[in-house]
Image: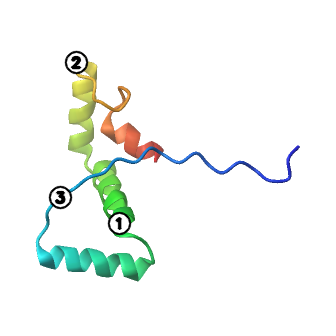
Amino acid sequence: MSLLKAPPKQPKNATLQLRVDEELKTKLDRYAEFIGSSESYVVSEALKLVFRKDTEFEAWLEQRNNNGDQLQNGGDSLFETAKRT
C-alpha cells in the first residue's frame, strides 16, 4: 500500500469568454478576494448553484434528454454534470 494517495482527478476545463458591465466585474473581483479564490472559481460555483436551485430548468433538461436530445457533455444533463463537479 502506498504512503501517499493519488490526487483527485480534476475535471476538464473549458474556456469561456464573456462581457459584463464594469460594476459586476468589480463585485466579482471583490467577492473572489473576499473568499480568497479566483474569479473563475466564483463564476463556476455561482453557475452550479443556479443550476442546482432552478428546478424548472432541471425538469426542462431532463425532458430534453428523455426526448433524445443529447447535450455535448457525454449525454448527461447539464444539471447532472454540475452535480459531479
The structure residue drawn at horizontal position 30% and vertical position 52%, both measured from the top left corner, is 53
Q: Which residue is mark 1?
A: 42
Q: Callout 1 environment at 10 Å: few (<14), some (14 to 19), or many (20+)?
A: some
State the quadrant of the N terminus: top right
> Which label is found at residue 29?
none
Disc 2 to disc 3, C-alpha distance: 30 Å
- Foreground: disc 2 or disc 3: 3
- The outermost residue toward the top is 68
Front residue of 73 and 51: 73
Q: Which residue is mark 3?
A: 18
> Which amino acid type is shown beneath numbered disc 2?
Asn
Above or below, 45 against 62 in this view is below
> Which amino acid type is shown beneath numbered disc 3?
Leu
**Pointer 2 or 3: first along the chain:** 3
Q: Which residue is mark 2?
A: 67
Asked if disc 2 and disc 3 are in contact, CB closer than 8 Å, the reply is no
